[in-house]
Amino acid sequence: MITINLYFKQAWQLMKQNRFFSAVYIIGTGLAISMVMVLAVVYYIRTANIAPEIHRDRMCYLDFVIYKYNEGNGSYSSSLGIRYVKDVVLTLKKPEAIAITTSPIYQYFQGGEMFASVAGNDDEAKISYMGCNDVFWKVYEFHFLYGKPFTESDFESGLKTVVLCRSMARKLFGKEDVIGQTVMLNEVEYRVCGVVEDVSGTLEHTYSQAWMPYTSMSNVITESVDERENTVGKLQANILLRDKHDITAVQAELEEAVKRYNTTLVGGQVTDPKIKPATLTIMGVSSSKAYLAIILFLLLFLLVPALNISGLNASHIQDRLEEIGIRKAFGAPRGTLFMQIFVENLILMFPGSLAGLLFSYGLVDLYKNILLANSYQQFITEDADVITLSAGMLMNWQVFLYAVTVCLLLNLLSSMVPVWNAIRENIVSALNK
Amino acid sequence: MIRHILKIIQAQFRSNLWILAELMVVFVALWIMTDYFITQYTLYHRPVGFDTDRVYQVTVSKRSVDAPQFIVYPENSEEPRQNFDRIVERIRQHPDVEAVALSMFSLPYTHSNTTYGFRKDSVELWNIRRYNISPDYFRVFDIRPAAGGSPDELAQRLVQPGLVISANLAETFFGRTNVVGEELIQGEDTLKIVAVTESVRNDEYNERLPYASFSQIEFPRDGIVPESTCIQMQITFRIRPNVETAGFEERFMKEMRHQLQAGNFWVSDVQSYNNIREQFLERTSNSSGQQVISSVMLFLLVNVFLAVIGSFWFRVNRRKEELGLRMAMGSSRIGLLRFTITESLLLLTLAALPALFICGNLVYADLVSASTADDRLLRFFEVSLITWLLLTFIIVLGVWYPAQKAAHIAPADALRAE
């Protein structure tokens, strides 16, 4: 403890003596850390369990069906159809729960826009919506400010009931506690049963401004005579696994279920059903490519400043060779010397890191529409800022842990070689300086 | 002098190693990014072919099936189509409107399109975008014949049986653009070319679907079009040149709100096409990529700045004796300044040599966009020069302060340190 105290004192003195060096050092480290932390924060927000998507690590998704016609070699593929959901997806026993929602991508491509209005107010607000089942509210943890989610029986009966987000409730009614009020959605009367905290647009599987039972939307559930239309449709399944390694078992179960389902089809067959694990999408770039991009940028962001600071350290340490020589002459072991300089640099790094972390929050906020966009957001043409940041997304122990790791790593990278070179120097030649 | 400096650099090779390594890594990274920006710049400045000034898009919405006012039409009713036509006609009759066009998956600055292929002899092209449009589309977006002329000419040709293709498509198949009367094969049919338009692209950054062919939007003879098909048709219109564009959308909507309803259809939005264009360009991965890459470039440049200013500052401090000696021997202050700056630029050039070797290999291996440039060698030199100049600027900026300090040493002070 005493030595650490001593290190602190010494580092402080050095910082004061060498203002120019300290300033360059602090700016250099701060900049490096802010860039790496932007990556870390973005990675965290896109992958961590953030309410309402509190089980992202155990989720997998099924949002694509290929229906291959028996005649010719045409096929038709899109989201899941109503009968496919009923006869295949909901028969799966391995998953813990399966939330069914309307597919957001479908809405944007098919022009399924929705306008909301309230009696006595002529203005119509464009609103983003999501049809879902009652399990949705169990898989995801929404923060209900007022009221409750709709129930299983509401869902079964196709009751016209809706959960609104706080900002939309305020926009439509001028207040937030609007339980029991009616809102006109595309001229259809819906009763508000709950008001929840706004959801950030970066949470693509739950983001919406209104959630209603999809059974209440006749364009989704009307069973047509055409088996293709019942198989391929507008829904997707968000599957909560009991354990994240279950995905292969669920895939096998799904293939079995599809096999059974195919025996009931006449005009075609469902081919290649595929459950997708949660994929990392950053800036509209998905999975392995996104990881590659992150690793490349991480290398660049660490390597260049590390070289930079190594150079500074190497220059700085030459000025201190006398001191090192004297300490070595009095018998200080190499490890102690290394530790001392390492700790010194770490202390020097601290103010820069803190500023860098705060700066990275600013950068993420500034570029949030680019960095945190989900896979379909580039197709939406809306003016509204749907991607919002909460304090919990930025400040949490994982992000702080990343920051500390980055600091240690950068420090190790940048002091290792110069310090090692310096303490290997011959005592006599060091003393000679 | 250069040989002299090179010797100094060599003598201090150990402490120069760090900055050399950093300059090399940064040079490669900046080279790749400069190349990216040059590619983007060239793409952006190629003509798009669509004139979106004074053009507006109308969004027609359909009442929900569950709505109480919903009118159920029998399956074979002509009513939906007529309702839709009514809305189009009312827009056309507005005094400010010059031309109204209908189209299906065929608008610029969108993500929806249909493609198909053409064949001539053994040459086959598959990535041809098909524009399903009404004749006035050429007037609305001011698309002209490749040989010059007015959009009206194209509008007349569109209704004739045959093909209207874009200039670059004609160029690819025939090597020239005056190909009216020539034939192309589509599937089993042989089609005669009746007009050639200027080249058009979906947007400034689009490379994927460069070719275009235009066909008149087709409806069943009996006129029965279901409502769901009607609202897939997009309505665009151009306003007359003397009409004030500022606030036009609001004025138009206010004035026309009640007229623009028919059956289950109603107009939910009017948007200026420049606005649509801006939003599209803002959301493409290109524009976000540009912003991110520029931030990274800035980051790298600041790092180089810090590295240069830091290491030269130490260097000047340590070499006070040497500099003092130089002054005592008659070096002028300007001379010392020049000496320090030349030293830093020589370092850059030394680092650039291996970096350029790496970049050259990247081009050779088709890993950067320079490999798609018309003249690879020219592009390589262009990008290298810009990168070198960029780094030179930053290095001179960084070395200035230490160099000034070096130049203003009092020789007596410096020599005393000896």
Image (tube, helix red, strand yellow):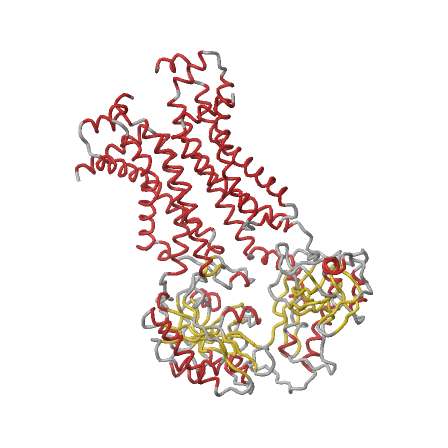
Q: Nearer the viewer, residue A69 or B135?
A: A69
Q: Is residue A22 above or below residue A64?
A: above
Q: Is residue A54 above or below residue A10?
A: below
* Residue at 68% in and 85% down: B77
Q: Is residue B101 above or below residue A283?
A: below
The quarter of the rendered structure image containing the C terminus of chain A is top left
Q: Residue B377: give x, y in percent of width and height.
A: 62, 42
Q: Nearer the viewer, residue B139 or A79?
A: A79
Q: Nearer the viewer, residue B185 or A395?
A: B185
Classify residue B25 as left or right of residue A48.
right
Classify residue A321 as left or right of residue A255.
left
All told, the count of numbered labels is 0
Q: Residue A195: give x, y in percent of width and height.
A: 40, 70
The quarter of the rendered structure image containing the N terminus of chain A is top left
Q: Residue B14: give x, y in percent of width and height.
A: 38, 30
Q: Residue A84: give x, y in percent of width and height.
A: 47, 81
